[in-house]
Every structure is written in C-alpha cells, then in structure tokens.
Image (tube, helix red, strand yellow):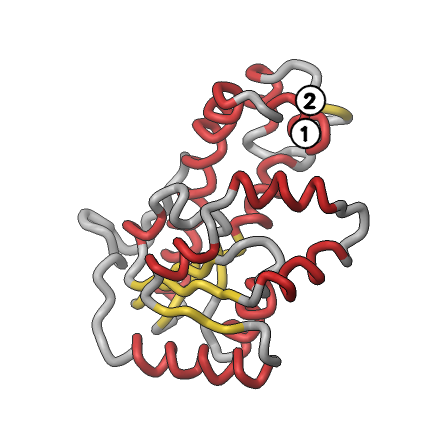
Amino acid sequence: MIVLGLTGSIGMGKSTAARMLQAMGAPVCDSDAVVHGLLGRGGRAVPVIDAAFPGVVIDGAVSRPALGAAVFRDPDALKRLEAILHPMVQAAQRDFLAHAARRGAKIAVLDIPLLFETHGERRVDATVVVSAPFAVQRARVLARPGMTAEKFAGILARQMPDAEKRRRADYVVPTGAGRLVTRRALQGIVRDVTSRPGRHWPPRGYQPGQIHHA
C-alpha cells in the first residue's frame, strides 16, 4: 500500500485536496480531526493534559483557547504538549493504515498540517504539498470567522514557509487556479504513485490484525 503525506500551510486548500483524494478512492486520515478527538470529552489525551496543564480542562474536555494560552510564546510548554499529543496521533495514524490495508486500499493518505515540521516525511512514501499564491492564501484565511491579520501572521510564524515546503515536496499541487487544475494534478499524482510499490506499509514486524496504541 502506498502511503501519501498531504500537507500545506493554512489557507492553501489542503482540506479540498483531501476531499478530492477521498473521491478518487483513497482513504484519508485527518490529523486535525484525530487531535479534536483526543482533546474532546472522553479523549485519551484529556487526563494527561489536565495533569500537565492544570486548569485547561473544562467539563471533561480540553479547552483549546485555554490550552493555546498556556503554550502561547512558551516553547517549553509547547514541547511538553507535543510530547503528549504526537505519539497519540501517530498511533491513531498507524491504526488507520492498518484498517485501510485490511480493506484493500492501494493508496492511503495521512493529512498532516505539520508534516515536515514533525519529520512525518520519514513515515510516508511520497509527500504532497498544496500551494497557492500568497494573496489567495491571505484572502482565504482572513475570510474565516474570528481571524485577524495579527493571528494570521502568528500562525505563519509557527509554520515552515511555503517555499521551503514546496522545495521539500515530492509533488506540489496548485490550488489557486481553480478546482479543475487541482483535481487534474492530484489525478496525475495518483497515477504516478500507483506505478511503484509502497515502502512504509506494512511496517517491519507488523502482524496482520495488529492494532497500535500509544
């Protein structure tokens, strides 16, 4: 099975690309959705984060604004949070890949916003970066409810620059010239990657039916 890593900076159209890949038959694991589940009521990360960051859990779920305030401009706190969440997210991704393989998927997609920042490229067969001109990106992001130019600048400062992501990517998908252009680029990638064997699934030592947990 081929494992694709899909990424892109905020407002670049990653969610749209993920939906297109799903429509082409490739299951997609949304890492943001995994994190939401871990932080939500009953989520496995809730008690661990409650112990590490007292006061951020409200009514059994992690308050994302409170957690954000706890790690804002505090690199050490952010590292503690990442040390909690990243292993749990990666365990969920491995479970997803196991299920996709059992269903006979030829391609499975890991949608990871911070793919390169977390060295996720080491766990996939090819990386796909979605990209659009900065003016398009900025307009998309500032159209979101509650978004400001200051918040946008802060998010960009924490992400790897788009130019560097494009440089590192195996494939770059343009998302600023219309959905048809984006879809055709993704179709070309799917055709290309299915012509070669996957190298990362199954992992070494994997036994059929095995489920991973953090």
Please give left or right for residue 184 compared with residue 36 in the image.
Answer: left
Percent of width and height locating residue 71: 59, 24
Q: Which residue is mark 2?
A: 56
66 relative to 95 in the view: left or right: right
* Rendered view: 131 above or below 79: below
Distance CA(mark 2)–CA(mark 1): 6 Å
Outermost residue, right side: 145
The disc label shown at residue 62, or none: 1
Within 10 angstroms of label 1, few (less than 14), some, or many (20 or more) residues? many
Q: Quadrant of the N terminus?
A: bottom left
Q: Amino acid at mark 1?
A: Val
Q: Mark 2 near mark 1, Cβ–Cβ under 8 Å?
A: yes
Q: Can residue 104 be seen at all in this image of the molecule?
A: no
**Marked residue nearer the N-terminal end (2 or 1):** 2
Number of numbered labels in the structure image: 2
Q: Is residue 147 visible?
A: yes
- Above or below residue 41? Residue 140 is below
Q: Position of residue 204 (x, y in %)?
A: 19, 50
Give the quarter of the figure containing the C terminus: top left
**Dot 2: within a 10 Å radius of its alpha carbon, few (fewer than 14), some, or many (20 or more) residues?**
many
Name the spot of residue 120 as percent of width and height, x first.
Answer: 36, 48
Location of residue 47 in the rendering, given as x and y in whole percent from the top left corner: 59, 22
Snapshot quadrant of residue 100: bottom left
Q: Which residue is found at the position 32% from the left and 66% from the top? A: 170
Q: Secondary structure at mark 2?
A: loop
Which residue is at 62% across, 35% downward?
A: 39
Of residue 105 and residue 130, the one placed in the foreground of this image is: 130
